[in-house]
Amino acid sequence: MRALTHGLTRRSIVLLAVLLAVLVALPLFAGDYLITVLILILYFAYVGQAWNVMMGFAGQLSLGHALYVGLAGYLAAFLFKDYGVGPWIGLLAAIPLTMAAGAIIGFLALRFGVTGVYFAILTIAFAEFARIGFDHLDIVNGSGGLFLPVVQHDQSDLWLLRGPPTMFYYVILAATVVALVLSRLLLKSRIGYFWLAIREDEQAARATGINTFRYKMAAVVISAGMTAFAGVFYAFYYNNLFPEQIFHISRSIELIVGPIIGGLGTLIGPIVGAFLLTGLSETLTSALGAVGLDLPGARQVLYGICLLFVIIALPGGVWPWLARRLGLGEPR
Amino acid sequence: MPLEIYLNVAISGILTGLVYGLMALGLSVIFGVVRVVNFAHGEMMTVAMYMAVVLFSTLGLDPLIMLVPIAAVMFALGYILQKGVINAFVTRPESTQFLLMIAIAIILVNVLLIIFGPDAQGVQTSYSYDSYAVGPLIIDATKAYAAVASLVVAAVLFAFFRFTRTGTAIRGCADNHTGALVVGLDVSHLYALTFGLGTACVGAAGVMLVLLVDATPAIGPAYTLLAFIIVITGGLGSMAGALLGGVLIGLTEAMAGLLFTPSAKSMFGFAILVLVLLFRPQGILGKAAR
Amino acid sequence: MTLLSIQGVSKHFRGLTAVDRVDLDVAAGEICGVIGPNGAGKTTLFNMIAGELKPDTGTIVFSGERIDGLSSDKVCRLGIGRTFQLVRPFPGLSVEENVIVGGLLRRSHVGAASERAHELLRRLDLYDKRAQTASSLTLPDRKRLEVARALATDPKLLLLDEVMAGLRPTETDRLVAVLRELNSDTGMTIVLIEHVMRAVMALASHILVLHHGAAIAQGVPEAVVRDPAVVESYLGAESVA
């Protein structure tokens, strides 16, 4: 517990506790629509947190994270549909799969010195391979899509992840909290310090005895492994998977916008970013609908403009700015 | 399959590849000099494509004739964009640059969507279905014209960088930013100029591409990716490399489409990209130290 | 006992010979100075010892093991700590965190590394500034921070690259005292590149002089500073009173 809260101001601990309490109690008085929106927000918060481990901590920009989401989702869905294997078991299989994929990409990149923009493009290439590959993979029905049997809405089956939105809400909320706690513990541990050193100045980190290859690999693999849960969740929540959608580059970009806007390298950044962006998106949809300007594309233009504005005005991200404003101490 | 079919497809791929090459040339110039990762490259090309479509459908002006004016407009837009918005981001971390360009890309794509709708729009000229017979080979007239025009534009750009003072100054900036400042070059103006040249290139490429491919707002991202693949494969900093890369990718796509399924054709481009990144990161014609 | 033995080490950069067949033996517990004009090859020599560069010829043996060509992190783990000529602390991390990173090399818990860090920060007069961000420190403080960080890795040999540059005389004297203490208390072997002769004379028991990559003199300080070749190429006649 001490490791968890050490360094946080009293104000921020209180704020976090209040926020958590509100989120836990929310389904009692919120309608289905709000819950669905929050599920989306928390999904992006979770997956953004996972991505942030690779980028914010170890400084490796991955633009192909949808690869891990898709691999995990497909594996778990396939095992469930064809063999009746429950999603939590499926997750146990999906995590090693995504970690292996991450290890391959990480190894290739680090061993061959592929960094920065080139690394990012390499990750895009692999995600595209998966997209095209799965389109032709008949055992998961290729481009036709993989569909999971949908059941009654009112029963909650946590083991099989079948149930009403409220159940999914609590699952993703718990996952996000776990991700946050895990990231915080990692950051405060030896590996976390090494990651920060590598991110700050890789050459100096090496001169201080850090085996940068090993720790960068660790970040890539851990990040990929964490993302597996997002894939499994996605599959069982939406009940259908299409290679064209789940591996698409817009998915990869979607999930990085939150952490970057929220505050790269900070723990709360991805969460703040997710709330902001999904909130913005939904608000724009309703606002435009109300005004009658429901043109396809109109929402995205405004979304893009808001994005632009935040990028230009708040270089470090929203969370660092917010944290200072609210007197919450140094954002970490 | 008879040899002629292979050759025809190959030639078709090479000619299209030259247009790709011109598009990639624009990116190479931007990425190589200003060092900004232009993730809106394909989207900018789409803008030019639509300009050509509009001019053709309303005023009946042939894209090849409108090449220079459209490129000029694209140049101006690029210059303003760089000077006004992007310049502040040149020193920022790559992830922020990505996001900036992605935001711009989102805006561009969706503005086009609002104005033109999602349906494909093309340009059918009087010579759209013409072809030349060279021995047993059949060459598409539009592809031939587009390819030739691409080469001309590339040559003009090359001459500019090689033989003019401004071109040399830009090359100096690319080589050594601080040195350029010290010598008194107006770096931000030169950056804006370079970005403008890049967008002019991609604009010209777009004008020619619309003769070959229909325009929809959604095709931008795929071409951005293609441009990056070509630039990396051909070699950053090498103009001939961009063209060579374009030809290579165009050829690969065409042959892959013929020999395998059409939907898998971009996979080969990616495979080449991965191999280049791992084994020859400077690209085919790039300089060794990255 | 010879801790570090450099034999016939050279480095060429495309036609330029940066280091030309240099020999140097450093005994355990010794403080050795490396001096010479700018461009003499001193930092290049350091970079070869520390694993940033691979020598073109020659061998470097540390504690009985050959280390030439090993990577810089491996060399650090073997027991050589270094500072950089253009100082490089981890800018976004606090002073304390910088040193903890070093301490974590040989300790698996942040708590233990933190204790070691505090100990070193006190020794180097940085304890009061431990919560400040490294990038907000003055240059002399950043230099001391780098020394603390290198020391936290528990090296047997410390390579200091122009660590006195830019310091005022009082600051120089203070750092000299700290290094001397370190050497007498813990037996830490130190090799330092320096232009500040006052520091070199106060600390070193053995000096190597480089010029155009080659060793032009080596020996006890009193003899080396009177060596005519050294006077001519570097020190200048006025320095030999």
Image: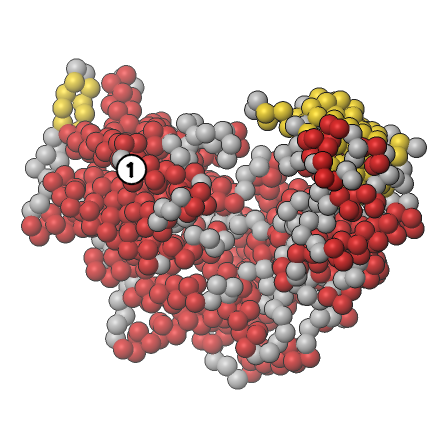
Which quadrant would the N terminus of chain C be assigned to in this image? top right
In this view of the protein, can residue C166 be seen by the observer? Answer: yes
In the rendering, at what x and y percent does residue C118 appear?
Answer: 81, 62
What subunit carries mark 1?
B
Nearest the camera: C26 or A191?
C26
In the rendering, at what x and y percent does residue A130 appear?
Answer: 48, 43
Q: Compared to B132, does C144 lie above or below?
A: below
The kind of residue on which mark 1 rests is Arg
| Helix, strand or loop for disc 1 | helix
Q: Compared to C99, does A172 lie above or below?
A: below
Residue located 38% across and 59% down the image: B103
Nearest the camera: B93 or A53?
B93
Give the image quarter of residue C157.
Answer: top right
Residue located 17% across and 15% down the image: B135
Residue located 60% across and 78% down the image: A327
In this view of the protein, can residue B24 be seen by the observer? Answer: no
Q: Is residue B40 left or right of residue A314?
A: left
In the rendering, at what x and y percent does residue C14 appear?
Answer: 56, 24
In the rendering, at what x and y percent does residue B132 appear?
Answer: 13, 24
Q: Is residue C20 left or right of residue A32?
A: right
* Residue to which mark 1 is pinned: B165
Residue located 27% across and 32% down the image: B163
